[in-house]
Image (spheres, grey):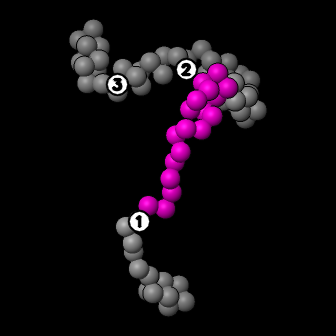
Amino acid sequence: MGSNNEHVEYKDIDVTLFDMNGISNKNSVLDMNERRKVLEEIIPAKILADYDSHWRNAEQSVRINHYKLTRWIFWFY
């Protein structure tokens, strides 16, 4: 039973759909510019400077760890 004695029924259905053809997926320069603008608006300058000096390494780590072969190669390196 739900609140106010309402009957609850669970359904296995999709309730959302993501369209991957939007401008953020089509125009990477615009996407990067918008992302930067948001970061500058919400992150204090000193923290953003630290982020700027480390983001590339973090991004590379994600790409390396995505594939088993590159994880294996870098594990031995």
> Does label 1 or label 3 sit earlier along the sequence?
1
**The magenta stretch spans residue 42:** no
Name which residue type carries label 2.
Trp
Looking at the picture, how far across and down is residue 26, in whole percent? 58, 29
Name the amino acid, label 3. Asn
Residue drawn at point x = 73 percent, y = 28 percent: 37
Are the residues flagged by discs 2 and 1 in contact, CB closer than 8 Å? no
| Distance from the alpha carbon under mark 3 to that under mark 2 | 15 Å
- Region of the chain picked out in magenta, as a range: 14-32
The answer to whether marks 1 and 3 mark residues whose Cβ atoms lie closer than 8 Å is: no
Question: Camera-side residue: 41 or 29?
Answer: 29
> What is the quadrant of residue 63 in the picture?
top left
Q: Quadrant where the C terminus lies? A: top left
Q: Which residue is mark 2?
A: 55
Question: In the rendering, which numbered label is found on residue 65?
Answer: 3
Q: Nearer the viewer, mark 2 or mark 1?
A: 1
Where residue 32 sits: x, y (%)?
A: 64, 24
Disc number at residue 49? none
**Crowding near pointer 1: few (<14 within 10 Å), some, many (20+)?**
few
Across the whole image, how many numbered discs are drawn on residues?
A: 3
Can I make out residue 32 in this image? no
The one of 10 and 61 positioned closer to us in this rendering: 10
Q: Which residue is mark 1?
A: 13
In this rendering, position of residue 38 left or right of residue 14: right
